[in-house]
Image: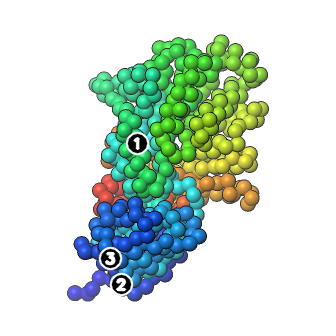
Amino acid sequence: MQKKKQPTASELLMPLPRYLEEKEGSFRIHMGTTISFDPLFSDVAVLATEQLACKVGDEDILFKKGVSMGEEAYQMKVGKNQIVVTASEPSGAFCALQTIRQMALANDNIIPCCMIEDEPAFSWRGFMLDTSRHFFSVAFIKKLIDVASLHHLNRFHWHLTDDQGWRIKVEGYEKLETIASKRTLLNYCDGREYGGMYTDGEILEVQEYAHQRHMMVVPEIETPGHASALLAAYPEFGCTGGPYEVQDRWGIFDEVMCAGNEDLMHFLQDAITKTATLFTDPYIHIGGDECPHTAWDTCPKCKERMEREGLTSSKQLQSWMTTEICKMVEQEGKRPIGWDEVLEGAEKIGLPSSLIVMSWRGDQGGIEASNLGHDVIMCPNTAGCYFDYQHLDSYEEPGNIGVTTIEKTSEFNPIPKELDTEKRSKILGGQGNLWTENVTSSRLAEYMLFPRLSVMAERLWNPQEFGSVEERRESLEKKLSALDINLYRGKSY
Ligand SMILES: [Zn+2]
């Protein structure tokens, strides 16, 4: 029988490292494999004992401290008898561990000999999960964070509130749990109650798990639109006083937070303070997208606010509100992030310069925002970043209207072509988003996310051509299957 050719490191990895030199032979991880490490990397080593099933002791795998390497950079030499990793920071050592783990998962614990020097192209490499439209368990969120971190992703954007459910507790507002976190299933269903709420303990558990994997958690409290769930619980926060209901349909609703209401502003202050206290990473996403102004146009309180603040349009009123909410976020020592609609109506009063703009309706928001001096995160739905879209235009595929093929994602470039060279540094990176209107279960969420999220991760770390991505589909499928991911295995275009 002919001996099967051993795969090379470049056939097993996604993202591919920035520099990779293949060598003869391989290193095998087995039950007796030992790991030794600089004390700086003790937490990474503990994770290594779990993820590679090795034990602390000798130096089969050695993590050494390097000098003046980038935060997430690492070097790695895989020899037949030893793997030596060098990094300056724990996050670099962690990325090296994931590179080893990828090869172990894809190749039955046999690591091809090689020399790697690696670091990311972009600092913001994220994924978003909408937990409002459908609720996802803590166990599943942790599973996603783990698989995302395997691909060197480092931001988990957690969409916690929307029209169809409010998922985070705010002390003093008990109806968020009793009313806003639940809805009655009316569409093609029997009127059952559906919902869920994350306890503070669960959120801390997710955060600790993410931090072990050098991933930041970015909570999103949506304002001032997509607020039906909140208004159902507290109708006095809306322009008309209601009644409102937690929506069981998808879309954009006219019922939004009343911009003239002081009680609502106090609530937002409390919600932001709570979020800032619970989440320890530097960012809070404040939403800002898809907010109709029909209710504001006929609301005496909103009109009064506009007069008092010298505003002449409802767009300016939204801009005023965005600025107020940004101030709340900044007072808590965090940086605000908003969807690209926050730029509308901002000509008159401007926006806080610390505000990071997330460009989702194509490239234009990102270009405008960077020209105004804002940092930008790119996730255009037109360029392969929306994973709620179908994998293919086919009756056989689940998903929202819209198609994101693997090929499309493999062509995503966070830097818009039209952007001036000197503005390019404003682009922090990008992310893939999973809206879950039509994603009713975690198994389906996996199918929508993978392998597109793996491909996205490579675009943000070290972009490769589509042909190269295609060649690695098989090893990628093996890795993801080993982690029990229910991935899409169909055509790429
Ligand atoms: Zn109003």
**Residue that appears at 59% across and 55% down:** 429
Which SS class for mark 1? Answer: helix
Residue for point 49% across, 55% down: 154
Tag 3 and tag 1, C-beta contact below 8 Å: no
Q: CA distance from mark 2 to mark 3?
A: 16 Å
Q: Amino acid at mark 2?
A: Lys
Q: Select label 1 or label 2 by which is in front.
A: 1
**Front tag of 3 and 1:** 3
Disc 2 element? loop
When asked about the image quadrant of residue 14, the answer is: bottom left
Name the residue: 49% across, 16% down: 235
Tell me the quarter of the picture where residue 33 sits.
bottom left
Relative to 252, residue 216 above or below? below
- Work out whether residue 421 or residue 76 is closer to the camera in this orientation and state it: 76
Does the closest atom of ligand 1 sit within 8 Å of the Cβ of label 1?
Answer: no
Q: Position of residue 357 (x, y in %)?
A: 63, 44
Q: CA distance from mark 3 to mark 1?
A: 34 Å
Q: Earlier in the sequence, mark 3 or mark 1?
A: 3
**SS type, badge 3:** loop
Q: Height in image: 16 above or below 312? A: below
How many residues crowd around disc 2 within 10 Å: few (fewer than 14), some, or many (20 or more)? Answer: some
Task: Name the amino acid, label 1.
Answer: Leu
Which numbered marker is on residue 58? 3
Residue 93 in the image, given as x and y percentages of width and height? 46, 66
Residue 396, horizontal then vertical, whole percent? 36, 49
Q: Residue at x 60, y 50 (%)?
A: 377
Q: Amino acid at mark 3?
A: Asp
Question: How far from the left and from the top, in percent, is residue 315?
Answer: 69, 29
Residue tagged by mark 1?
204
Question: What residue does disc 2 label?
Answer: 80
